[in-house]
Amino acid sequence: MTILSAFDIGLVVLILGIGASTIAARDAFAAVIGYVVYGLLLAIAWVRLSAVDVALTEAAIGGGMTGMLLLGAVARLRLAEGNDVRTSLPTRLAAGVMCALIAAGLAIAILSPPDPIPTLAPMVMEHLAQSGLGNPVAGVLFVYRALDTLLEKVVLILALLGVWSLAPDSVWGGIPGLRVYARPGSTLTFLAQLLPPVGIVVAFYMCWVGAKEPGGAFQGGTVLAAMWLLVMIAGLKRVPSISQSWLRLLLVVGPVIFLAIGLAGMVLANAFLDYPAGYAKPLIVAVEVALTLSIGVALGMLASGPPERVRQP
Amino acid sequence: MNLAIDIFSVSAVSAGALFFLAGTVGLLRFPDSLTRLHALTKVDNLGLGLVVLGLLPQVNGLFGALKLVSIWLLVQLSGAIVTQLIAGAVRQGGPQG
Amino acid sequence: MNAATLFGLCGAALVGFGLYGLVTNPEPLRKILAFNLLGSGVFLVFGLVSRRAAASGLGGDPVPQAMVITAIVVAFAATAMAIALVLRLLQETGRSTLHVDNPGGTDTDRGNS
């Protein structure tokens, strides 16, 4: 057994242990902290699976943003009365047996792979050079399956609309209820003044370098959202009300530019979302930058929640 | 020469891992939140510094080395600030462990 | 068995854990957590499929990797909506559960939407 396989086994044991403790924990806070640690361990697992773009996305969105959402929810739900009846033992046993059967079925499917393993990698690499990209995952996201990426961005905006629509009628158009800890001169203010410039550079670097190496618009957009949330939580900038036009403009600039380039492709190239020859890389980079901005704003607003108070005139 | 560099890297990273282990033992064994925070920040910064020091000869180019050092600095910054915030919250909320 | 298959089996086990948590835990927040665990287990199975199909000099098939990136973002969007719903339920009824003690006219209407 080599050192690397011992590392893999240790990592899998840790992941399963923390996953089980997340399910079995009594206290919701402990479960959420376990989930954040689980997300970071998963990012290491993704690196071991040679999927560095996925590792970046999992660490940023799966570990970071989801953890922040869940911690905020746990803090608010602590004041709630949860008169829950614990599920009875026969139900839990039956559920356990069913889940074990499903997991066993998946394991059997995993352990019997098809004989010539089907792969799309040669097809991806064949035409990747034409688009000027060096990162095959970026090639799949923006060239071969660009429609999926466009629709994914629209799904983010739809989710944001769904979250906004949960506001009571009286505060529609108001300010999201993000908990702000504005104490001037505190260490949080210091962090919020020092970290965002670095974070913004890192975000755009990740978006730019995603064309050649692991990175991309989603990862960069998440770092941008985190920096914006830090600045808002430290009270250095006010949480914007959702009816501000600059907010809505930034939210849609990404998908609108993507859609416009796609429609232009019907005229200038062969089909919807086809890029004219030779112009693929600059168009893709333009789309990625616009998407980074939109994703940053969308994720920041998703983490802030629905409006809770009306904007003071 | 390569062997010497590799030995240096392995020993520095192992020393860093030992420090992390010491910090985790502190996290598990110390009685209350403030002492645990103290153990974690001191030890994790030093452990990460040793890991970065061990990885520096393995990186090719100045930019890679600068990125590693800036990672260490950023982790120190965020770790220190978060420790202060948690300690402040613990002191306000009263010792609950 | 190589490392990728090990991670795939880990993913299958996580699907089992997540499904168990989703079915047995009565609180909505814990259900959301279990749902995320279930999703990440499925993504790990995709990661195995990608790693197994490594060819032409790459470390893994990029198509499943791109699908997992999309899926992580969409799962986050769904989690955000679900948490907003749970918090709204808390605002409306003061409770965090869906279990109703005496059905029929317990909720106080506060004149909202």
Image (cartoon, grey):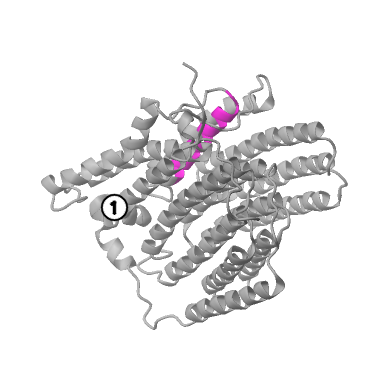
Image coords of residue A150 (percent x, y):
31, 48
Q: Nearer the viewer, residue A215 or A228?
A: A228
Q: Which residues are magenta?
A: A219-235
Q: Nearer the viewer, residue A261 or C105?
A: C105
Q: Nearer the viewer, residue C100 or B52?
A: C100
Where is residue A283, by image quadrant?
Answer: top left
Q: Is residue A236 left or right of residue A282?
A: right
Q: Nearer the viewer, residue A68 or A93?
A: A93
- Which residue sits at x=44%, y=70%? C49
For disc 1, the marked residue is: A146
Image coords of residue A253 (percent x, y):
32, 35
Q: Is residue B20 left or right of residue A189?
A: right
Q: Is residue B91 above or below residue B29?
A: above
Does residue A44 appear in the picture of this structure? no
Image coords of residue A25 (percent x, y):
71, 58
Dot 1: chain letter: A
